[in-house]
């Protein structure tokens, strides 16, 4: 963990503002607009409706964002990482069934992350319609809005590879300006109707749910929930900036947001019955309350803030996917670390997949109003799943009754929000839920496909490396077998008691004996120290069988070939290995011979004829192997692109069950008209 993240600092707070609060910080762009839509039109809005709605916003931010996430959930950090997967990793030993809320919640937040960039950037760009900048007048065409939105989003996804530290430092000052802008114009408009401050009382929040001025009843919570959708992303981004920097900045952000909601509410109350507004249902109070000479600046700064909102979800998605890979929920992907902070990462596959899906959402819906109708539904599912896992965590530090009370309190509120948000399903929520189910299906196949494969793998599929020492030593000296290579390397994980998959030994001894001077079995372990590089060697009591454990820092490239050449040098210098001086070489005094790396690819072909495995399990296992084969290959993962790599196919199960019904048939031979059996 970077020590800078363990303390509060101006630089840390600046980065926090730049990469954490984008999503929740842009909620003033669309929440009040959604509430006007619930009322039908401006003319239907009364002061009681506005005050009650803002009171709901205030207490939702207080209960869900502040109390649940900032105060309670952020205590549940896993090696300084936050998010639903980090929380699951802390409690998974409590019960096996906790895998289900973890998978469902993770898939939901990843799906909602595709909608956040679309709705925030589009809603901000739409503010440019008919705006004048000197002699230039912006178009009123929605098609032009979509084109500009597409360009902005493409640029955002392109810059991700530079790292969140760099991005946060550049976005931080913009967000300082943004929250200052929200506060100032919120206060200016608040002074025109100070009575809106009554929204601080929870009485008005409860009253509006049952008041006749609220025509949608409890379903108003579907719009209110939009104000707190960034809470889960805030928790996920904790590892990027540190808990203490979030503690220091959240009160300032909360105050800025609430002041702006109060200002918008005051403006709506004062102008609800104006002839120019009373029949409108799609105006945006955020822009309308700005003085004419500040309107264009507000649109520009809102667009920049919307970009940062997208950034918060993107970085949160990287963190979630990285944790999912570690938990074996998702296939292995290449994770890069663009800065010296381990938690600041970049995953190219995730970045461009998010980009494609986000742009598809933009063009499918066409405008921000339709996107808002779908926004927030999936994230309510994530919050509920987080509450379930949080209860398991709290049981470890609190009395069970207290932990249950806390969980029921948050769970009841979030269940009500979910019910209120279900009305969004037919208006676009089906899109995010479809994306969620697609992600959940991939996770399901990867995780349970592996579990079912392990279930069917018998003990005979693993062998002890120690049992084959004599054969490997003899094979190495057997000159009747052609020399395959000087150093034969298998990237394989050796379990306790030197247990290794039978397929590895089958590759060396059975398919075609591979004679080598030295047999290497290498395991790569990633550490939390950026540039650490060390190793351990176990010769298993021989001079030609080497069990190597590599320990590499997260900033070190996994160039296994380079490391092995150095290890051979060290072992030769120590007299552990005999010199491997090649007869021909371009390098003087070279002591290292040639290497061949064998990659074993498991194939599911033997599943079809295996009657011991059920049809559902066959599909799960086959699906998992398919995903394994189309994602990061071992060659690229271990940096072996320029090495001598041999790829082999292997059945899942080397040892096959004998067919108990197979018997020899009697054969009759006819010789000289005499029958012989």
Image (cartoon, helix red, strand yellow):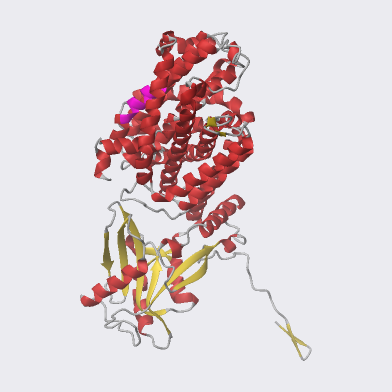
The x and y percentages for residue 118 are 54, 37
- Please, what is the dominant secondary structure of the magenta stretch? helix
Relative to 629, say whether 136 is above or below: above
Q: Residue furthest front?
A: 135
Comparing 577 with 379, the one in front is 379
Q: Which residues are magenta?
A: 249-258
**Residue 256 highlighted magenta (yes or no):** yes
The N terminus lies in which quarter of the figure? top left
Which residue occupies 62% across, 62% down? 609
Comparing 618 with 120, the one in front is 120
Q: Quadrant of residue 130?
A: top right
The x and y percentages for residue 62 are 39, 21
Q: Residue furthest bottom?
A: 672
Relative to 665, say whether 42 is above or below: above
Relative to 390, say whether 662 is above or below: below
**Residue 498 highlighted magenta (yes or no):** no
Comparing 556 with 359, the one in front is 359
Q: Is residue 598 visible?
A: yes
The x and y percentages for residue 293 are 47, 24
The x and y percentages for residue 649 are 52, 68
Q: Residue furthest right?
A: 673
Number of marks in the rendered image = 0
The C terminus lies in which quarter of the figure? bottom right
Which residue occupies 33% across, 62% down? 497
541 lies left or right of 133:
left
Relative to 398, say whether 607 is above or below: below
Q: Is residue 77 visible?
A: no
509 lies left or right of 214:
left
């Amino acid at each position: 963990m970077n020590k800078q993240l363990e303390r509060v600092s101006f630089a840390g707070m600046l980065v926090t503002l730049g990469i954490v609060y984008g999503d929740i910080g842009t909620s003033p762009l669309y929440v009040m607009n959604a509430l006007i839509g619930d009322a039908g039109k401006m003319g239907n809005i009364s002061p009681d409706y506005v005050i009650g709605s803002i009171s709901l916003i205030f207490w939702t931010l207080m209960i869900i964002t502040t109390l649940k996430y900032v105060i309670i959930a952020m205590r549940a950090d896993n090696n300084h990482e936050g998010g639903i997967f980090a929380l699951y990793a802390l409690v998974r030993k409590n019960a096996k069934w906790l895998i289900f809320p973890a998978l469902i919640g993770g898939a939901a937040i990843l799906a909602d992350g595709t909608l956040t960039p679309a709705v925030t950037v589009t809603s901000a760009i739409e503010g440019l319609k008919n705006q004048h900048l000197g002699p230039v007048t912006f178009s009123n065409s929605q098609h032009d809005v979509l084109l500009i939105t597409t360009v902005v989003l493409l640029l955002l996804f392109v810059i991700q590879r530079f790292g969140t530290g760099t991005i946060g430092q550049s976005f931080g000052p913009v967000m300082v300006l943004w929250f200052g802008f929200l506060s100032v114009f919120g206060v200016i408009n608040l002074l025109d109707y100070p009575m809106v401050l009554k929204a601080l009382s929870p009485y008005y929040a409860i009253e509006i749910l049952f008041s006749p001025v609220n025509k949608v009843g409890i379903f108003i919570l579907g719009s209110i929930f939009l104000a707190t959708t960034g809470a889960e992303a805030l928790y996920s981004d904790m590892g990027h900036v540190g808990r203490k920097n979030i503690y220091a900045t959240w009160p300032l952000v909360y105050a800025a947001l609430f002041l702006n909601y109060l200002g918008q509410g005051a403006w709506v109350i004062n102008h609800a019955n104006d002839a120019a507004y009373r029949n409108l249902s799609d105006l945006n109070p955020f822009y309308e309350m700005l003085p004419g000479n500040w309107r264009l600046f507000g649109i520009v700064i809102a667009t920049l803030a919307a970009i940062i909102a997208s950034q918060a979800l993107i970085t949160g998605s990287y963190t979630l996917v990285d944790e999912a890979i570690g938990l074996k929920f998702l296939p292995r992907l290449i994770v890069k670390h663009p800065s010296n902070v381990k938690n600041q990462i970049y995953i190219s596959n995730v970045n461009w997949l998010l980009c494609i899906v986000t742009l598809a959402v933009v063009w499918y819906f066409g405008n921000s109003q339709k996107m808002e109708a779908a926004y927030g539904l999936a994230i309510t599912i994530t919050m509920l799943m987080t509450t379930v896992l949080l209860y398991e965590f709290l049981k470890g530090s609190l009395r069970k009754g207290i932990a249950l009370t806390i969980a029921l309190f948050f769970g009841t509120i979030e269940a009500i929000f979910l019910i209120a948000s279900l009305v969004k399903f037919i208006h676009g929520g089906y899109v995010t839920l479809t994306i969620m189910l697609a992600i959940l299906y991939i996770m399901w196949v990867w995780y349970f496909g592996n579990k079912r494969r392990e279930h069917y793998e018998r003990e005979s599929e693993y062998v002890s490396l120690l049992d084959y020492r004599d054969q490997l030593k003899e094979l190495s000296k057997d000159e009747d077998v052609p020399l395959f290579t000087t150093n034969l390397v298998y990237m394989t994980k050796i379990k306790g008691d030197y247990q290794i998959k039978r397929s590895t030994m089958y590759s060396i001894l059975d398919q075609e004996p591979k004679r080598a001077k030295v047999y290497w079995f290498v395991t790569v372990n990633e550490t939390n120290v950026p540039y650490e590089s060390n190793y351990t060697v176990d010769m298993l009591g021989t001079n030609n069988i080497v069990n190597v454990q590599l320990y590499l820092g997260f900033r070190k490239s996994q160039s296994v070939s380079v490391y092995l050449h150095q290890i051979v040098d060290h072992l030769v210098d120590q007299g552990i290995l005999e010199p491997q001086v090649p007869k021909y070489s371009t390098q003087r005094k070279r002591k290292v011979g040639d290497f061949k790396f064998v990659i074993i690819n498991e194939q599911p072909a033997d599943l079809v004829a295996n009657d011991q495995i059920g049809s559902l399990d066959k599909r799960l296992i086959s699906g998992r192997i398919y995903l394994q084969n189309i994602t990061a290959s071992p060659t690229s993962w271990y940096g072996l692109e320029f090495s001598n790599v041999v790829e082999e196919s292997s059945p899942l199960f080397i040892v096959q069950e004998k067919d108990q019904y197979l018997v020899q048939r009697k054969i009759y031979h006819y010789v000289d008209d005499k029958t012989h059996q």
